[in-house]
Structures are given as structure tokens and as C-alpha cells.
Image: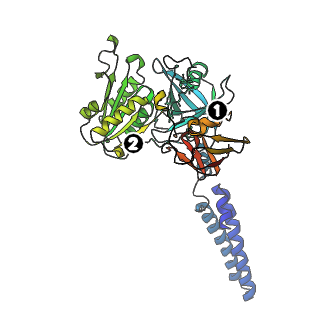
């Protein structure tokens, strides 16, 4: 009965229902007592009336104050907002603002098309988006770091660099980034997966954090610096960023303004090719290296790196040489380092037998793989099987697929969390003579 009462949300209705129920029970009990005792006195009837009135009044008061702790611990509206803010697969988002941040980086502000709440995220995480691009035979899936950390999470911001074709190569310029810059406008709708990723700043720690980036690697760093400023401004932060010059330097004013609000946020901008217009806009010229980092932050710290592969490789090497343990260095790769022809030798496998049979169950293909075929993803693509992918470096989880038989050998430790019985095919090769994959 109490549970039924707890379901009634309107306190007045609940009070009336409780009054009727308790009043009826007490009136009936009083009638039974009077009947059993066979009392004929006027006082017996008074007892009956007073008992009924008492029952109705106490029921009404009880109904008014009662809330079912078990089922009513969350107001319905809270439950709804929880359901709508956390979603699993794709959810449509509308581009509500598009802002040019530098010569090559543009920001896109996204709000859910259903206008319901969105889940908060941890600074450093990314979103995965899906684009229907004319000329592409399947949707293009890409991953972009969340580049903001607003006080109230009412939008997501992605800041995307237009990827040109690499110098000297006659290939197409970046498919998704150029489409975003050229075709996506305010009002465009894009399917988005929930925030994800393990490149996260634990803002509650007190050890100084050194955020080191170049180019578009600045995106997760702004989010981290903003989150720390909002949630734990006591934590010392060094924001060290490298750009070619002022024109290619996104978010200069935004970061400078943030440092004005947070005395524990120290900023250092390093330009490799400053122009005369950049005078007083940067702190050093040249390239960021471990020596500069150690000069700026001589004390113990945690280091967060994001930028071009060569930039990260050289800084990680320099930090290692200056005695910084790996456990203090965290990084996010946006892409695989380009390998020269000489580096593209046969990758090693854990198997003695170098050939493997891969059954792509959904595609109905059984194929023989050999080490020169590369990762399972590369092998699948070469054979006209096109599983979804985004980062191709084991970070985003887009290429995850179920494995029915056999095991894979990872070429590097996956960063994305994999479901039980699933593998990431962008960074793995067969680890047994036979593999059956749900692709
Ligand atoms: C966790 C994570 C976070 C990220 N965050 C951001 C972010 O905040 N901002 C951002 O801008 N990017 C970010 N990225 C990178 C982003 O996901 C895309 O990789 C990037 O936008 C390039 O995608 P694209 O489709 O434009 O280029 P693609 O079409 O994938 O091409 C990439 C490059 O390869 C070149 N190329 C094409 N064909 C060939 C070929 N045959 N041989 C050699 N080169 C070729 C293209 O010209 C281009 O330069 C992130 C990546 C990850 C994994
Ligand atoms: S494509 Fe991102 S983890 Fe494989």
C-alpha cells in the first residue's frame, strides 16, 4: 500500500488517498469494536465518530509528508535527464556556432538536436563524429578532442585543423577535416558518440601539471587548463604551446584571459617562425624541447603531451633523458607517425607460423594473412572489407569487433577500453593460425 502511495506525486492527491484509506480502516475497526462489545451507550457512538475523524486527519497528514524512499529517491525529472544526458551509440547534434580560431583551425559548437541535457566529460576526452561525405562509399568516422570546459555543460566544442595533403605527395587532402571546414555550417546536423578517452587530467591532484602541445594538439590542453581553473585553481599549471607564428596560433587570447583569472596558470608560447606582427605575443622562438621544459618547471611535475608525432617523440625522449619516469608522462596521439620505407619492414608477430587464416564471418570471406599485410584493419581494407575506424592508433575504440575464435597480437598497448571478447583491429595482427572475426 505504501508503495502505491509513494507512486502518487501530487501531495494533495496523496494526502486525500491516505485520509480515505486510514479513515476507512479506523472507522471499520471502531465499528467492529462497538459491534463486538454490543455497546449501546451514546459514548460508544462518539468513540466511533472521533476515531473516524482521527483516522481521516492522521491519514491526511501522513499522506502529505510521505514520500517513498525506495522508489521516490530520484524525482522523475532527474531520472529523465540522466537518461537523456548519457547515451550509447550515435546521437544527433546541431552545429550552433562555427568560429575561425586561426589560419587552419576552426571551432564547432555542438548542441543535441533533441535539446535535452548532455553528459559532462573529463577534460582531455574526445568525441567521435560521423560524416556523410559525397563521394565516400561509407560514412567517415573521426575523433576530435573536446576543446573547452564550460562551467555548465550545455554544448561541446570541437576545434578542427584543416589537414592539407602532405608536402610532395599527390594524394587527397584530409577528407573529414576539409569537409568540416567547407561544408559544415551553423545548422548542420552531425551524429556524435558520447565523450570518451583516457587522456585525462585529474584536476584534484596538487602536483604541478605541465601541458605541452604544438599545433592542433592544443585542443585537449585548453580543456584541461580550464577544468583546473574551475575545479582546483590551486594546482599549478604550465601551459607550454608551440606554433609557427601568430596567424597559426589558435586560442592565444582565450588562454591569456584564462591565465589572468588563475594566478597558478603559467603560460609560455614558443613560435618557430615569428613575424614582426607577433612582437610581444610570444615568449620564446624556436622549438619546444625538454631543456626549455626543465628551465620553466624545474620541480617535480606531471607532463601531458599532445601534438605532431615528431614533436611528441622528441619531447618524450628528452624528458626520459632528463630522468623523468614514464609514469609521470601522459600523451595523446592524433595520428600514427608516418613510417619511412626503410621502417616499413615486416612487423614482428608472436607466432612462429607467419601465415594465418582469417575468417571475416559477416562478410563471408576467408583469407590468408601474412605479416606484410599489416594490421587486420589494413588487411581487411585491402580485400574490400571496410570495417569502421577512426584513429587507427588504438585510442578511439571505433574499430572494435567481436572475436569468435583465436587471439590477436597487439603491436602496441590499446588505449581504448575493449569489451570482453572483442579486439581492436587497427593495432593488431593474428596471434593464432586461425581467427574468426565478427566482421
Ligand atoms: C583522440 C584523438 C583526438 C583528436 N583530436 C583532434 C582535434 O582536436 N582536432 C583535430 O583537428 N584533429 C584531431 N584528431 C585528428 C582527427 O581525428 C583526424 O585524424 C584529422 O582531422 C584528419 O582527418 P581527415 O579525414 O581530415 O584526414 P584523412 O583523410 O584521414 O587523411 C589524413 C592525412 O593523410 C593524408 N593522406 C591521404 N591519403 C594518403 C596517402 N595515400 N598517403 C599518405 N597520406 C595520405 C591526407 O592528405 C591527410 O593529410 C584527433 C585524433 C584522435 C585519435
Ligand atoms: S580505429 Fe580507433 S581504436 Fe581502432
Q: Which residue is mark 1?
A: 382
Disc 1 vs disc 2: Cβ atoms closer than 8 Å? no
Under circle 2, the secondary element is: helix
Under circle 1, the secondary element is: helix
Give x and y (percent) for residue 41: 71, 85
Q: Is mark 2 within 8 Å of ligand 1?
A: no
* Residue that extends furthest to the top in the rendered view of this protein: 276
Assign the C terminus to one quadrant of the image.
Answer: top right
* Residue that extends furthest to the bottom in the rendered view of this protein: 37
Give x and y (percent) for residue 48: 70, 77
Look at 61% across and 47% down and name the residue there: 83
* Residue that extends furthest to the front in the rendered view of this protein: 353
- Residue 35 found in image quarter: bottom right
Look at 67% across and 79% down and name the residue there: 47
Count of numbered marks: 2
Q: Residues within 10 Å of mark 1 (few under 14, many from 20)?
A: few
Give the CA separation, mark 1 to mark 2: 48 Å
Query: Can you say whether 73 is above or below 220 in the image?
Result: below
Assign the N terminus to one quadrant of the image.
Answer: bottom right
Amino acid at each position: 500500500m505504501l508503495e502505491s502511495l509513494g507512486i502518487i506525486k501530487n501531495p494533495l492527491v496523496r494526502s486525500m488517498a491516505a485520509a480515505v484509506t486510514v479513515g476507512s480502516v479506523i472507522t471499520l475497526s471502531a465499528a467492529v469494536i462497538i459491534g463486538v462489545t454490543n455497546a449501546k451507550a451514546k459514548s460508544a457512538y462518539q468513540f466511533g465518530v472521533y476515531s473516524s475523524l482521527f483516522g481521516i486527519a492522521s491519514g491526511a497528514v501522513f499522506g502529505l509528508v510521505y514520500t517513498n524512499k525506495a522508489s521516490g529517491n530520484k524525482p522523475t525529472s532527474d531520472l529523465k535527464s540522466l537518461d537523456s544526458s548519457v547515451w550509447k551509440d550515435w546521437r544527433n547534434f546541431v552545429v550552433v556556432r562555427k568560429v575561425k580560431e586561426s589560419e587552419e583551425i576552426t571551432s564547432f559548437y555542438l548542441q543535441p538536436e533533441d535539446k535535452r541535457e548532455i553528459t559532462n566529460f573529463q577534460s582531455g576526452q574526445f568525441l567521435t563524429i560521423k560524416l556523410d561525405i559525397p563521394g565516400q562509399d561509407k560514412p567517415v568516422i573521426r575523433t576530435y578532442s573536446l576543446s573547452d570546459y564550460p562551467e555548465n555543460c550545455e554544448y561541446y566544442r570541437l576545434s578542427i585543423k584543416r589537414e592539407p595533403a602532405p608536402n610532395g605527395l599527390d594524394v587527397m587532402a584530409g577528407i573529414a577535416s576539409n569537409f568540416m571546414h567547407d561544408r559544415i555550417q551553423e545548422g548542420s546536423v552531425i551524429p556524435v558518440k558520447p565523450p570518451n578517452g583516457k587522456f585525462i587530467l585529474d584536476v584534484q591532484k596538487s602536483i604541478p601539471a605541465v601541458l605541452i602541445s604544438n599545433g592542433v594538439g592544443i585542443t585537449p590542453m585548453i580543456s584541461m587548463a580550464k577544468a583546473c581553473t574551475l575545479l582546483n585553481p590551486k594546482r599549478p599549471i604550465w601551459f607550454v604551446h608551440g606554433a609557427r607564428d601568430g596567424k597559426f596560433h589558435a586560442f592565444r587570447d582565450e588562454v591569456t584571459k584564462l591565465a589572468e583569472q588563475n594566478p597558478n596558470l603559467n603560460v609560455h608560447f614558443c613560435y618557430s617562425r615569428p613575424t614582426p606582427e607577433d612582437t610581444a605575443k610570444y615568449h620564446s622562438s624556436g622549438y619546444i624541447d625538454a631543456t626549455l621544459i626543465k628551465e620553466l618547471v624545474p620541480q617535480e611535475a606531471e607532463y601531458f603531451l599532445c601534438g605532431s608525432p615528431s614533436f611528441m617523440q622528441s619531447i618524450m625522449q628528452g624528458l626520459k633523458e632528463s630522468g623523468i619516469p614514464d609514469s609521470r608522462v601522459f600523451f595523446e596521439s592524433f595520428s600514427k607517425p608516418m613510417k619511412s620505407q626503410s621502417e616499413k619492414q615486416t612487423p614482428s608477430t608472436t607466432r612462429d607460423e607467419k601465415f594465418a587464416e582469417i575468417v571475416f564471418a559477416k562478410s563471408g570471406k576467408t583469407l590468408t594473412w601474412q605479416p606484410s599485410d599489416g594490421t587486420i584493419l589494413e588487411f581487411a581494407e585491402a580485400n574490400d572489407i571496410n570495417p569502421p575506424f577512426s584513429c587507427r592508433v588504438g585510442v578511439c575504440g571505433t574499430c572494435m569487433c567481436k572475436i569468435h575464435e583465436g587471439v590477436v597480437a597487439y603491436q602496441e598497448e590499446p588505449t581504448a577500453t575493449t569489451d570482453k571478447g572483442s579486439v581492436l583491429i587497427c593495432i593488431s595482427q593474428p596471434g593464432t593460425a586461425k581467427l574468426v572475426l565478427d566482421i
